[in-house]
Amino acid sequence: MKTVRFLIILLLALSISSVAVAQSDPVVNEEFGVTVTPPEAWEALTDDDSAVASFKHGESQSQIQVIATPLMNDEVADVFFDTFHSTLSESDFEEVSREETEIGGFAGTSVTYEFTHSGVTLAIKVFEFMHDDTAWLAIGYMQDDEADEYSQAYYSVIENLSFENGE
């Protein structure tokens, strides 16, 4: 009986430790030549085909997505970004702030939205920027009352983006 209990505990420990290792592994996307590092204690989501990388915080259910699309020129980038923001506005997301800023050495636009549903208000943080000929969106979804706690994790994803060309 002690042997069975020991094996069960050992198997549980191994499964928990493998999850912890998987949570800290960076996501490498060869198509866009980028490595995206998840925040500590966030797990990579593998079922999000629309994103270069997606992460979820298990306890809070907050999420971070990094989305990219190859472009030909700045006008196409403007259409891509405008379409994304229009979709949010048309879905009753309220724009709270917008500013030109720099995060992690990338110059871009930071926009914050709020959306209330079933008595819960979500804060949606969006950072849009260009790198080479690619338009990038980093999007953080978190409950408004937890935004201060999880915003640093969102910013760390942007700050730790690593491109093959060394930027």
Image (spheres, helix red, strand yellow):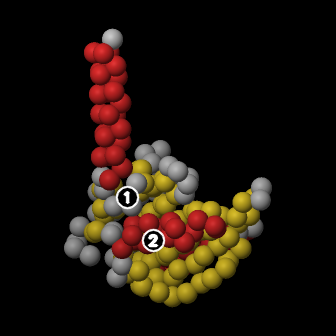
Would you say residue 69 is visible in this rendering? no
Would you say residue 96 is visible in this rendering? yes
Q: Residues within 10 Å of mark 2 (few under 14, many from 20)?
A: few
Q: What element does badge 2 sit on?
A: helix
Q: Quadrant of the N terminus?
A: top left
The reply to whether discs 1 and 2 touch (Cβ–Cβ < 8 Å) is: no
Residue for point 40% across, 54% down = 41
Residue 110 or residue 69, whichever sits in front: 110
Residue for point 26% across, 76% down = 167
Q: Which mark is residue 40?
A: 1
Q: Residue furthest top?
A: 1
x and y, in percent, of residue 150 in the image: 50, 66
Residue for point 57% across, 69% down = 147
Q: Residues within 10 Å of mark 1 (few under 14, many from 20)?
A: few
Horizontal relation, residue 119 to residue 30: left or right: right
Q: Is residue 121 above or below residue 59?
A: below
Q: Which mark is residue 11?
A: none
x and y, in percent, of residue 112 in the image: 60, 76
Residue bearing the label numbered 2? 152
Identify the image quadrant of residue 119: bottom right
Residue type at the position of mark 1: Glu
